[in-house]
Image: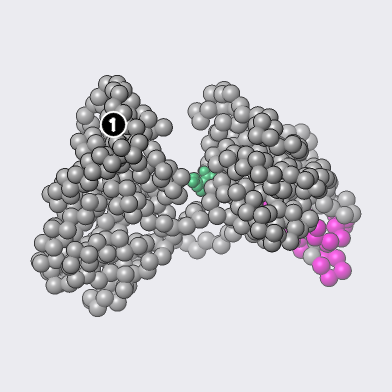
Amino acid sequence: MTLGAAMGGARALAAMKHVGLNVAADTFMTAAYTGARAGLVVVSADDPGMHSSQNEQDNRFFARFAGVPLLEPADSQEAYAFTLLAFELAERFDVPVLLRSTTRVSHARGVVHRAPAAGPPAPRFERAPEKFVMLPGYARDRHRALLERLAALEREAEASAQNRVELRDRRFGIVTSGIVYHYVREVMPEASVLKLGLSHPFPAGLVRRFAAEVERLVVVEELEPYLEDAIRAAGVPVEGKAYFSRTGELSPDLVARGLERAGWPAPAPRPRHAAPPTAGRPPVLCPGCPHVTPYLALRQMGAVVSGDIGCYTLAAMEPLRAMDTTVAMGSSIGMAIGLARSGGASGPVVATIGDSTFLHAGLPALADAVYNGTRVTVVILDNATTAMTGGQAHPAAGVTIRGDAAPTVDLRALCRALGVGWVKVVDPYDLAGIRLALAEAVAQPGVSVVITNRPCVEMPVKVRDHPFTVADGACIACQACMNLGCPSITWSSGWHEGRRKVQIDAVTCTGCTVCVQTCVPGAIVPAPGRSGKA
Ligand SMILES: Cc1ncc(C[n+]2csc(CCOP(=O)(O)OP(=O)(O)O)c2C)c(N)n1
């Protein structure tokens, strides 16, 4: 969309997490050939340490791979200033610009001084098929044009004010970029530093000049030895990953320890702002989450479950432990096809996918499963939102991202239109109903789809029904309700025949009634007090 907008003459910015760029890569790689009319900036928010991601790929390589400039802000002010600079470079060199941040920069807040930005040009699409239609004949020319642009950009990087030499103690020459620059300054304030803000194309001449000023050159960077390899390839002796991990985030402490390992004097102890200890809390599905029952049923029927990326990925954890594979957003149905075709699955093969993820990347694989007659069941977990990332709307949610009414994709009709012969919509709070639907679905000879239809209990509105409680003395400690993994159900202080009884926290219970349906002696009853919806 943003490439189309920029070709149409409007400045455009696409922001995504690191794995988002994998999905956009097909367009991104060729956008480097076409360029656009107005500036196109791609923001990649990388996640070293995988705070909430399935991998920690280092997207600086994407800049080198595609042949586009790379800007690496170190803090909020630079995030702002580099975004303006990115548009300027994009328009001056007719190339998309990659602005890469990491979690610590993306989540930072700071005072930002604004600068006047040049007004965007008036949008106007001008036909230029030799620039915008990447047939091989045109694309060959554009590839050559890209290499010429890169040579000009290299001169830019050599002279850029964003690539800054700070000469202090000449024994220590540190090359760094992004947030790590601040870690280095904090723990080794006396070190000489080359801070790279425009790090692709690589300013080899500048690095050589810096290296000549210092006794030892060490790169401090998170994840891959991206800068280190480039420096070594330029023929400059350098050290780096020998002292710093290639996985996870760095921190001021890890930088200090790495530099000590490199043989440099231990830095002065830093003041500590000790945070009070917090209890470890494993991630769990919320009380009343409509994603629980399909997984309970799938585990009980011995299905091989190809999972996807969303809140429901937590079904891989105890006590549900009902997901066998999860790799990338939208991969579940394709992987289920492969698992079914492998002949190695010990039970029925079932893909489970959220509504948002299904619309993002599930449709092509479902069409393929139908087309090629693969026997798989797909469970679409329709909670009418994109819960995991904060409740964004999507094309089947009925509202726009701003909350205005919008046309709604009818998921059942969509599956039928793709040729699925057996589609059933079920209430996930009806445990018997969901068991029955799944049993029927996996018995179908071809593709079957089960759609669950309860909204997320947290967003866009909180769903709170009358809470339940465990009746005094009625619990026989069978612990069947514990299989749900509901955070509202905890151990009580009571015992029955050597097993612990359970209790329900009335404050967090949403009244979904699923535990009531699992309770063998019928011990779970409405909590006393006012009934009705909160
Ligand atoms: C390619 C890609 N883009 C974005 C993300 C971030 N992300 C993780 S889960 C998710 C959406 C989950 O929505 P849905 O499938 O509806 O499940 P829910 O969390 O609502 O249960 C997104 C966008 C990602 N992991 N990969």
Q: Quadrant of the C terminus?
A: top right
Label 1: which secondary element? helix
Q: Residue furthest front?
A: 137
Asked whether mark 1 and ligand 1 are closer than 8 Å, the reply comes as no
Q: Is residue 485 at least partly visible in the picture? A: no
Residue 533 versus residue 169 in the image, above or below: above
Residue 169 versus residue 531 in the image, above or below: below
Measured as percent of width and height from the top left, residue 346 is found at 73, 61
Measured as percent of width and height from the top left, residue 192 is found at 16, 64
Q: How many marks?
A: 1
Residue 261 versus residue 307 in the image, above or below: below
Q: Is residue 497 magenta?
A: yes
Quadrant location, ligand no. 1: top right
Name which residue type carries label 1.
Glu
Sort mark 1 into few (<14), some (14-19) or many (20+) by Cα contacts within 10 Å. some
**Residue at (32, 32) in percent of width and height:** 132
**Residue at (20, 36) in percent of width and height:** 92
Query: In which quadrant of the rendered view does residue 355 lie?
Result: top right
Q: Is residue 467 magenta?
A: no
Would residue 286 appear left or right of 4 to someone viewing this image? right
Query: In which quadrant of the rendered view does residue 79 lie?
Result: top left
Q: Quadrant of the N terminus?
A: top left
- Residue at mark 1: 130
Q: Is residue 199 at least partly visible in the picture? A: yes
Colouring of the image:
one colour
Would residue 216 appear left or right of 383 to someone viewing this image? left
Measured as percent of width and height from the top left, residue 423 is found at 74, 37
Q: Which residues are magenta?
A: 472-499
Measured as percent of width and height from the top left, residue 313 is found at 61, 52
**Residue at (26, 56) in percent of width and height:** 177
**Residue at (23, 31) in percent of width and height:** 117
Frontmost residue, 285 versus 378: 378
